[in-house]
Every structure is written in C-alpha cells, then in structure tokens.
Image (cartoon, rainbow, N blue to C red):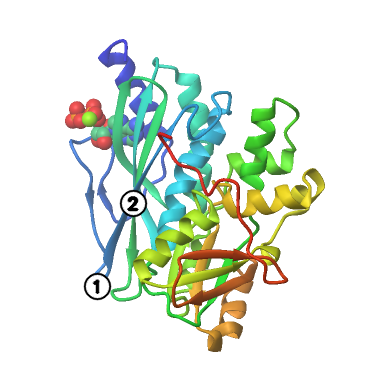
Amino acid sequence: MDSKVAEFDLIERIRRRIATRSDVLLGIGDDAALLQLPAGMQLVVAMDTLNSGVHFPPETAPADIGWKALAVNLSDLAAMGALPAWCTLSLSLPDANSDFVDGFLDGFLALAEQHDIALVGGDTARGPLSICVTVHGFIEPGTALRRDGACVGDDLWVSGSLGDAAAALSQWRAGGAIDPGLRARLDRPTPRVSLGRALRGIATSCIDISDGLLADLGHVCKASDVGVRVDVDALPASQALRACFDAEAIRRLQATGGDDYELCFSAPVELRSAVIESASTHAPVTRIGRIVSRNGVSALDASGVAWQPGQAGFRHFE
Ligand code: ADP
Ligand code: MG
C-alpha cells in the first residue's frame, strides 16, 4: 500500500460490511481471530489462491473475482462434506483501490451470506493482484468425504454439468464473443456445499473438479489404490455448451477442462437410490462410470472404445 493509512482504510471498509457469527469471539481488529469450535466437531481447513491472468482473465469484474475467490474454497469444504464456518482473506493489490475492494466485497459477501460463513481476518498488502482465501469448516468425526475411500465396483457420479467454464475460457482466448451462460459458470461457480453434506455416509470418496475431470480422478485412483473407468458419452452437458460446440469439443471440455467445481464421488451400487434421493434437493447428479481394480483413469465411449483426450487437465507452470 502507499501508506499505512490506505491499508487501514481498506481494512475498515471490509470490517464495516461483514456479518459475524456467535462463535466468532473476536474478529477483524485484533492481532488474530478468536473462534469457538462446537463441542465434538473436527476442524476442516482449506486454502486456495487466485492470481490475475492465471485463475481469472484480468478484465474479470471485481465482484466476480470476489465470488470466485470464496467459491473455489467453499468447493473444497463441500468435497470434504464439511459445514462452512469461518474464512480469512489475504488481498495483494497493485494500489489501494477502494472501488476494487468495494466491488470485490459485493461478490465475496453475497456468497458468504448464502453459506453463513464469517470473514474473521486477513492481510492486506501491495503487490500484483492476487487473492488468497482460507476457509474453516466443521465435520462430525469419522464422516469426512476423502479421496482414499473408493472401492472396486462402486459407481462413479458427478454433480451438475461439466465443461462450461473451460468453454468460456476457450471463447475468451479465441477473442470472440463469450456465451453469457458459459461465462457465468466461469466467473460464478456454485460450490456444492449442501450436496457434500448430504453425501456423508453414502459416498465412499469425493473430490471437487478444479483441474479437469480425468486429471482430478487420477488423484482419487492414487489415494484409493484403484482404477476408474469413465463413460465419456455419459458426461452431463449444459444447453449452452451443446449450443456452442461440436460433439468432440464438448467431450474434450467436459473430460479435461478445469474450473467446474462440481463434486465427483464414488458410492456403492446398492446405494444408487440413496444417492439420487439425497442429491435431489441439492444438485442434479449423473452416473458417469465405475471404480475398477487397476490401470488408473480410462475413458471409454458408449460403444466401449477407448477415448484419448488431447491434453489432460490444466497444470500450472507448464
Ligand atoms: P497485523 O499487523 O497485526 O497483522 P493488520 O494491520 O495486518 O494487523 O490487520 C489488522 C486486522 O485487520 C487483523 O484483525 C486482520 O486480521 C484484519 N485484516 C487485515 N486485512 C484484512 C483483509 N483483507 N480481510 C479481512 N481482515 C483483514
Ligand atoms: Mg497482518
């Protein structure tokens, strides 16, 4: 920041607008936050950083950046089956731009309110535009959805639809018009928090899709020591995606595009109706494959022919 005054002014702008919770004994304003964990619960902690030009196009509206910064973190809590409670926010800004901070808070706090998550502290510094959020949630002991519990024979499921965010990004990179429906999915992903909660006791493993379905499933295979067979023709696609791309491009975007923030989970075949019933009030779910004994992630089309993506998943620093 140009001066301490500017930094304090920004922090005060944030403090004035935040909602709090009764378990926040001390929030923004002291050296650290003081928080009351509910009896018998375990703490679930996740952190995600968004850098301008890497995680969002530089011209993204501040409110969308604010929404996304929290959404990608809530998605990690969702993938664990955790109940969101508190978050902290580290803001690195090129200058003490109060318009940016006000807009950022519009999006960030709108999503925070939906999930009753309280902003309890953070840090504000000068540097390239970068936002780092830490989220804290609660989980009943022994009920967390982990990557290492998938069992051979389980069904593989995914929530919502896949490929929209990557489709918007590809339209943006091509320099043409971006479909508004696809753009909304890139800028304002929906963290599947209530679905994650509903899957406790049903799903054997769960992951949120941030780097592309096939790449993220690789993590589940490794952690669970299993393989997975994905039916690429079963992957759910939105109307907007179908309207804008051909069949092969859709498959590639769905299977390898990133930024979906949908939940991909395994569940025993016997619990199919339980999955559908418990998911019904939270998000649509689609069965997309099966957990098998070996060979990592394989993708097959409806006739059982192996399908090879051009490039599997988004990787940083490559
Ligand atoms: P310190 O120098 O002790 O780290 P700071 O001046 O960085 O204190 O922060 C003062 C208070 O404002 C702390 O409670 C801190 O958590 C909070 N804070 C600073 N930046 C942010 C931010 N971007 N969002 C939320 N709270 C913030
Ligand atoms: Mg500080």
Mark 1 or mark 2, earlier in chain: 1
Q: How many residues crowd around disc 1 within 10 Å: few (fewer than 14), some, or many (20 or more)?
A: few
Q: What's the CA distance linking mark 1 and mark 2?
A: 20 Å
Relative to 45, is 151 above or below? below
Relative to 176, is 190 above or below? below
For the residue pair 294 and 243, the one nearer the viewer reads as 294
The quarter in which the C terminus is drawn is top left
Q: Are marks 1 and 2 in contact (CB under 8 Å)?
A: no
Q: Which residue is pictured at 50% across the width and 80% down the height?
A: 154
Q: Which residue is pictured at 48% across the width and 66% down the height?
A: 196
Residue 81 visible to the viewer: no
Image x and y of residue 290, in percent = 55, 75
The residue to which callout 2 is attached is 46
Residue 275 visible to the viewer: yes
> Which kind of residue does numbered mark 1 sit on?
Gly
Q: Is residue 318 left or right of residue 277?
A: left
Q: Label 2, secondary structure: give it.
A: strand
Image x and y of residue 231, in percent = 64, 68
Q: Can you name the residue that lies furthest to the right here?
A: 243
For the residue pair 317 and 104, the one nearer the viewer reads as 317
**Label 1 vs label 2, nearer the camera:** 2
The image quadrant that residue 205 belongs to is bottom left
The image quadrant that residue 9 belongs to is top left
The residue to which callout 1 is attached is 40
The image quadrant that residue 171 belongs to is top right
Indicate which quadrant contains ligand 2: top left
Q: Can you name the residue that lies furthest to the top here?
A: 2
Q: How many marks?
A: 2
> Which kind of residue does numbered mark 2 sit on?
Ala
